[in-house]
Image: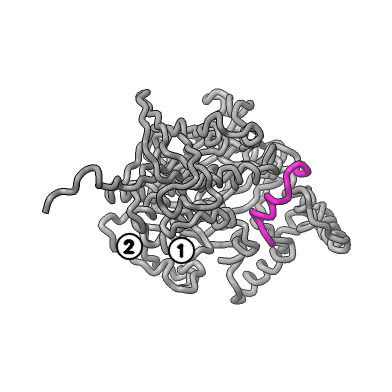
Amino acid sequence: MNPQHPSTMRRQRTAVIIGAGPAGLTAALELLEHTDIRPIVLEATDAIGGLARTVQYKGNRLDIGGHRFFSKSERVNAWWARHMPCESISNPGISTEEQRLGDTSGEACSFSADQPNPDHVMLLRPRRSRIYFLQQFFAYPLALSAQTLRRLGWQRSAAIIASYAAQQLRPHAAPVNMQQFFTQRFGRRLYETFFKAYTEKVWGVPCDQIPARWGAQRIRKLSLLRAVHHQLRRTLRLAGNAADTSLCEQFLYPKLGPGQLWEHIAQQVVERGGEVRLQTTASELCVTNDSVLEGPVLNSPVANSHITCVHALHASGAQECIPADFVLSTMPVPALIKALGSDVPPHVRAIAEGLRFRDFLTVGLLSKRLALRMPCGAPLDDTWIYIQEPGIRMGRLQIFNNWSTSMVADPTTVWLGLEYFCAEGDDLWTMPDDSLRSFAASELAAMGLLHLDDVLDTHIVRVPKAYPAYLGTYEHFDTLRNYTDRLGNLFLIGRNGMHRYNNQDHSMLAAMTAVDQISSGLTDRDALWTINTEPDYHEQR
């Protein structure tokens, strides 16, 4: 049989995926498993996993922000289980149903750790997260229990209950900002006690300037009454429907941190014929305005232009133009619009430039011990602690030993993550490393959580654009979205790619949905943008 003449041979279709985080890597592997399209993943940094990467420092592993593997989506749960099964669990204190993490199919944690690599497993972790306020621990989410009321004091507790009751007697208009949102859900006094300062610490602006949609997306129907109901059900050990995501009590976690899974997925992508290129930036996207193109996915009445190639800039300074049949972008939207060039209408560029982010830094701190212990004398068993102590800038404290003992090189030490919300260029972000180390340790000492003499080592990680904010020009985001949706072969996925405060599983679902669209020849972008907007998405499991 004579070989096919080169002029009649068809080039394999290619998808350029910008970003090697959960969304980008999920999309790459889904393309390889369900289509004949070859993915080329471009990652600007030298690390795999994006915001879900695991940072290693002298044998200790640091999880940026804390990544619980927990989802209502059966598709995501099955995907995780397929690529990293659960370790066998033998814990008489946890029932079989609890081991399954509430999965009614009984499959989420029914795997054995019989793997070639015994570290390639998910652990089932009990969630233990509390609020540290007035140098005392309070349950998180808040439970109106006798212990909470006792620690608040009878005067403050009475004022909180009276404020909540008074709020319920008032007509409820739709909340416009976060102050109104929290006040309606919890009453004015509880909002001012527990929610106001922390929310403003996270976002850097007053609550009355934060749109209510943030709360509506992140905590859904959670309210004081629902929290009380959840606490009663726990106390009485009554069976019921699955808890709110905000109230979930267990989660899965890779033994070596979240980056372990994504490094494995990147390896799978390469082994199956895709590419993952580190330290490679997508600097320019070349657009043509032809309206009729080959391939059903591009023949949409909505799409009137498409991307033909992606200019890649390597760390060495070398440049390359990569032909692209499809582009899936997880890069921050302002960077995407800039890469699309001067043809972008001025009003769309203005919206992109006005989008705002919240940046983030973590101080990894290794200590001999913590100053506080559990009432029984055991070490604190929290995975993370919300810091709401007045005058303290730290937002949250992770105890990595409690995520997985394999996160710590020496199990006799305590490996902590001190998390700060900040803005690129502000006093925290620009503080010299030595000063920041001293500042962070002194905050722990001021709260009575640590003795300075016990500090052994520290490591600092700065994360720009960690949280897309619903501030600035975000109210006009639909205009920008309508513009990008007209690029027939461009799909926006991931937290920064969609400028949406998504969890890891939402980002994965967006990637899966984009691949579904590509493989079926559809261009229904609404299927992407409705992810993480369903009224009950966070409410169960």
Position in image of residue 64 (x %, y %): 50, 42
Q: Which quarter of the rendered picture does the N terminus lie within?
A: bottom left
**Residue extent of the magenta highlight:** 207-221
Q: Amino acid at mark 1?
A: Arg
> Where residue 264 appears, x then y in whole percent?
34, 49
Q: What secondary structure is the stretch in magenta mostly built from?
A: helix
Q: Secondary structure at mark 2?
A: loop
In which quadrant is the C terminus drawn? bottom right
Residue labelled with disc 1: 75
In the image, 503 versus 338, the foreground residue is 338
Name which residue type carries label 2.
Ala
Marks 2, 1: nearer the viewer = 1
- Please tell me which of labels 2 and 1 falls first in the chain: 1
Residue at (37% x, 53% y) in the render: 31
> Residue 448, located in which quarter of the rendered image?
top right
SS of the residue under disc 1? helix
Bin the neighbour count of mark 1 within 10 Å (Cα to Cα): few under 14, some 14-19, many 20 and up: some
- Front-most of 423 and 369? 423
Q: Which residue is mark 2?
A: 113
Residue located at (69% from left, 63% from top): 227
Residue toward you, 46 or 274: 274
Quadrant of the image occupied by residue 228: bottom right
Near mark 2 (Cα within 10 A), the count class, few <14, some 14-19 or many ≥20, is: some
Asked if residue 190 lies left or right of residue 534, the reply is right
Identify the residue at the far bottom of this view. Answer: 239
* Residue 210 lies in the magenta-colored region: yes
Q: Does residue 393 lie above or below 9 as drawn?
A: above
